[in-house]
Image: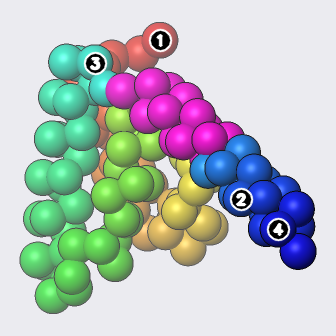
Amino acid sequence: MEEQAAQARQRAAASAKRLASASRRRADEDALSEADEKLLAALYALRKRLAAKQKLPAYMVFNDSTLRQMALKKPLSVEELLNIPGVGEKKAARYGQEFLSVIEETVGTR
């Protein structure tokens, strides 16, 4: 019985260590540069304007995580935009061109 409890504790500790390591990796991968922060601010401003115009909560346009991925990946086409989690066909059709314009204006073309 004690041996089973010890094994369970070891498995739990190993699992927690893996999760912490993965979380640190994601945080490093998702670190924003100063230019990315500028783009993210522009994306937030656009989202706020669109949400106010439609009388929606801002997260209904795109959530924070989706905007962050846009700032990191900087899509310049609808096809690239559709590869970002949180962007589906409907949102791409409704908001895509406006967000792509902000990205292009802020970072230019690659």
Q: Check disc 3 and report its element: helix, strand or loop.
A: loop
Categorize mark 2 by other alpha carbons within 10 Å: few (<14), some (14-19), many (20+). Answer: few
Q: Check disc 2 and report its element: helix, strand or loop.
A: helix
Q: Which residue is mark 4?
A: 2
Residue 82 location, x and y as percent? Answer: 62, 52
Residue type marked 1: Arg
Judging depth in this view, the residue of 49 and 86 nearest the camera is 86
Q: Are marks 2 and 3 in contact (CB under 8 Å)?
A: no
Q: Check disc 4 and report its element: helix, strand or loop.
A: helix
Judging depth in this view, the residue of 40 and 109 nearest the camera is 40
For the residues labelled 3 and 4, the Cα–Cα distance comes to 50 Å
Residue 45 location, x and y as percent? Answer: 12, 52
Residue 6 location, x and y as percent? Answer: 78, 59
Q: Main secondary structure of the magenta part?
A: helix
For the residues labelled 1 and 3, the Cα–Cα distance comes to 16 Å
Left or right: where does residue 42 sit relative to residue 26? left
Q: Which residue is mark 2?
A: 9
